[in-house]
Every structure is written in structure tokens, then in C-alpha cells.
Image (cartoon, grey):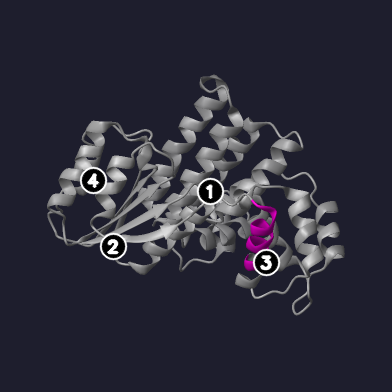
Amino acid sequence: MGLTLIQGGESILADRAIAAVIASRPTATTTQLDCGEIELGAITDALAPSLFGEDRTIILREIQELAQELQEEITEYLTNPDESVHLVLWHKGGVKGKALLDKVKKLKPEIIQADTIKKDGDKAQFVHDEFARAGRKITVDAVQALVDALGSDLRELSGAASQLASDTAAGKTIDVDDVEKFQRGRVETTGFDVADATLDGKTDLALITLRQALTSGVDPVLITSALASSIRTLAKVSGASRGVKSFDLAGSLGLPPWQIDKARRQLQGWNPATLSAAVVTLAQADADIKGASADPGYALERCILEIARGRSAR
């Protein structure tokens, strides 16, 4: 059995740690559960032995939110673990769930730190490292300008770094002028920009475009409509033979060839099960936005995270 414990409240770092575990087990089936929402028995069901004995990765997010009886489901499993399962537990920190945390640590899991980054110096280092990940150089002044402009949100900083690295000429050291140009270029984004980033599995970019869209006045309903339209397009194109040219399919599908080509590229990260799950997630978000939720922005963000993660967990 594999056991990984992620500790800390920085969600982008936790997400990356989880993604790394998933990537290290490409043939395993992945199940992710949000511990703030699950019911009694859900963990036991997820960890139950598979009939076919296939490798599985089970991810439990925010285990500090578990009620006592749900914590006991994990404790019970750990007394007799399944060798085909790699269990990933994310604890955001604090005293909640500490008893369970101590029990897990006694089993000597792989521990990955995802501590919240608060100090300006640490944020600057994070930004510098983001550019290094992209193979780009950036001046110290430019790093500080980006931190000053975007504040403490690491997802937004990561998305901005990715965008700057992509937009700036290859080989050029990114400087303050590039950052200022990027800031001036943050124009109104549309629901389809959000949908494209989400369906491409680019979680960071999807969240930053969502915030830009909402800030610039785009109605949340238009964003869910754009997501729904894009998912319908993927479903349409998924049923068509890849051997037929997009130009020849355009008439029967009622889509322009360029849209078919784009959908085919996006479909490389999707299958019927994950598309169906995305539809269910979107339907809930749509209901929340139209009256069931007091915070449409939060409902949208949660929806986008779940859909993008569904693609990456494929």
C-alpha cells in the first residue's frame, strides 16, 4: 500500500502534489473525495477491495473536516490496507482532525508540505520558481511588480506567470515593462475563455480568467452557458469518427470545421464518464447561481475546479 500525507493550507501546492501522485501511477484508477461533503460509508465504499484487483489511487481532500465516525472509516482501513491502493490524505492544518493526523503519521507516510505562503519574500520566490518551471528568466523588479499587482492569491500569480511566459518573446528575460504590458492587456474576458481553459484542464488559467470575467461584469449565467455549450460540442464531436475530416463533418454536426478541430484536441483529455460527471457538476452550479447559492462566484469557482480536476484525473 502507498500512503501519502499532504500537510498545509496552500491549495495550489496541494493540487500539484496530488497531480504528481496521479501522474506517477498512470495505469491506476483515480477517485477523489471532498471530505467536507461526503456521507457515512463513502470512504469505506471507495476503499473497499476491487473485484478485479486493479491499481487504484484514492484521494481524500481536507480530512480535517471529517466527522469522528468518518475518521474511524480511515482508521479501520489503515489496520488492514489494500496493497493495490495508494491513499492520499490532505490535511490543511490546525487542530481539527489532529487525532487522525497523529495516527496516520505513525504509519510513516510520505509527507509533502503545502504550507500557506504569507511572506512577501516567499511569494516572490514562488513567482521566480514559476518562471523557472517554464524555462524563463525574470528580473527581481519584475517579480516584485507582479506580486504587488496581484497580491497574495498564488493561483492568480501562477496563472499570470504562465501567461507572461507564453506571451513574451522566447529567450528574453522578462522585465518590469513586460509585467506592465501584461497588466494593461488584462481586458474583459468572456465565458468561452473560461470554458476553454477549464476543458483544457488548465485549472490556474481557468480561475484567473473567471475572476477577470466576473470583475469586468460578465454575468455568471453567461459563463455556465458557455461551459454548457462547450461540453455539448465535445459530446457531439466525440461521437464522430476521427477518420472523417472536420470539413466533411461540419454539415451533419452543425458546427464550423475550426470548432470541430478544437473539440478534437480537447477530447484527448476526456472520456464519456468524465464528460458525464462534468455535466452533473455544471447542472449543480447552474442551480446554485440561479438562486440556491448566496455566492455565485464561489459556486462557479468550485464548479470549474471540479470539472478541470475531472479532466486531469482521467
- The residue shown at (64%, 58%) is 122
Whole-number angstrom distance, CA of label 4 to CA of label 3:
39 Å
Mark 4 lies on a secondary structure that is helix
Whole-number angstrom distance, CA of label 3 to CA of label 2:
33 Å
The residue to which callout 1 is attached is 233
Instruction: Indicate whether 271 appears above or below 276.
Output: below
- Residue range (magenta): 119-129
The residue to which callout 2 is attached is 28
Q: Residue 216: x, y in percent?
A: 77, 37
Number of other residues with Cα within 10 Å of mark 3, as a class: few under 14, some 14 to 19, many 20 or more: many
Q: What residue type is disc 4 on? A: Ala
Residue at the outermost top position: 291
Foreground residue among 263 and 128 = 128
Q: What residue type is disc 2 on? A: Ala
The residue to which callout 3 is attached is 128
Q: Earlier in the sequence, mark 1 or mark 3?
A: 3
